[in-house]
Image: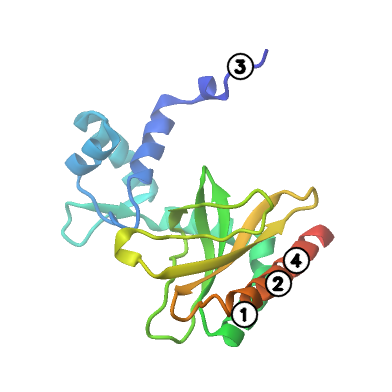
Amino acid sequence: MGRDPETYNVRAVERAMQILSSFDGEHTERGVSEIAQATGLHKATTHRIIMTLLNCGFLERAADGERLRPGLQLVELGLGALRDLDFRRAAFPYMQQLVERFQETCDLGIFDRGRVLYVEVVHSEHSLTIAARIGRHLPVHCTASGKVFLAFLPAQEAGIRAVSAPIRDIDGNVIATMSIPGPSNRLTPERIPEIAQALVEAANAVSAHVLRE
């Protein structure tokens, strides 16, 4: 029997990843004590790892000189990973066409540990839009058939609808979803079939591009 992959984890690296992962859209800057509390690590351990991350450019000091935020080295790594997503480049012109046609924001997400990670967003010109941010994670709900309707409906965002279609790899596995979210007064039941059909056609075109690569 093979060993559990987690047995190969290096504890210091694992803790460094915990610290980096404590930064998100709601916590773009954190102090050492705050990071220690968020990760459950001892403050002295947290401080040592933070200093290493600072020296390597993965963290940097915020404007107040005390709090910390993700550094440029981390940003460069993330952008490099995004640039290597071939289907992202293939999807972008189709997303632009969908936004021009329906005047709603279109986003592209991948499945990452049970959540959706947004890797591209094309915004509409509406003053009121429902848009994710590139790099943001959100919960996902999808049907087994792969034709998915995503609903991001916290109590404060009632009245939102989203239509989504899958992008597949050569083996038929869903590797990404292309979605159009918007207020329910614009994404009416009468419009959804047309939007869904257009999304499926665009997603299939991107899937065909993936097959050719």
The residue lying at 76 percent from left, 69 percent from top is 205
Mark 4: few, some, or many residues within 10 Å (few <14, many ≥20)?
some
Q: Secondary structure at mark 2?
A: helix
Q: Which mark is residue 98?
A: 1
- Render colour scheme: rainbow
The residue lying at 80 percent from left, 64 percent from top is 208
Q: Which mark is residue 3?
A: 3
Q: Which mark is residue 186?
A: none
Q: Which residue is mark 2?
A: 202
Mark 3: few, some, or many residues within 10 Å (few <14, many ≥20)?
few
In the picture, residue 96 is in which quadrant?
bottom right
Q: Is tag 4's residue or tag 3's residue first in the polypeptide sequence?
A: 3
Mark 2: few, some, or many residues within 10 Å (few <14, many ≥20)?
many
Q: Which amino acid, mark 3?
A: Arg
Q: Which amino acid, mark 1?
A: Leu
Q: Is tag 3's residue or tag 1's residue first in the polypeptide sequence?
A: 3
The residue lying at 16 percent from left, 59 percent from top is 64
Q: Secondary structure at mark 3?
A: loop
Q: Which residue is mark 4?
A: 204
Q: On the rendered structure, is 96 left or right of 154? A: right
Contact, mark 4 vs mark 1 (Cβ under 8 Å): no
Image position, residue 45 (x, y; %) = 26, 29
Which quadrant: the N terminus? top right
Q: Is tag 2's residue or tag 3's residue first in the polypeptide sequence?
A: 3
In the picture, residue 27 is in which quadrant?
bottom left
Q: Which amino acid, mark 4?
A: Asn
Number of marks in the image? 4
| Label 4, label 2: how far apart the Cα atoms are | 5 Å
Q: Is tag 4's residue or tag 1's residue first in the polypeptide sequence?
A: 1
Contact, mark 2 vs mark 1 (Cβ under 8 Å): yes
| Label 2, label 3: how far apart the Cα atoms are | 42 Å
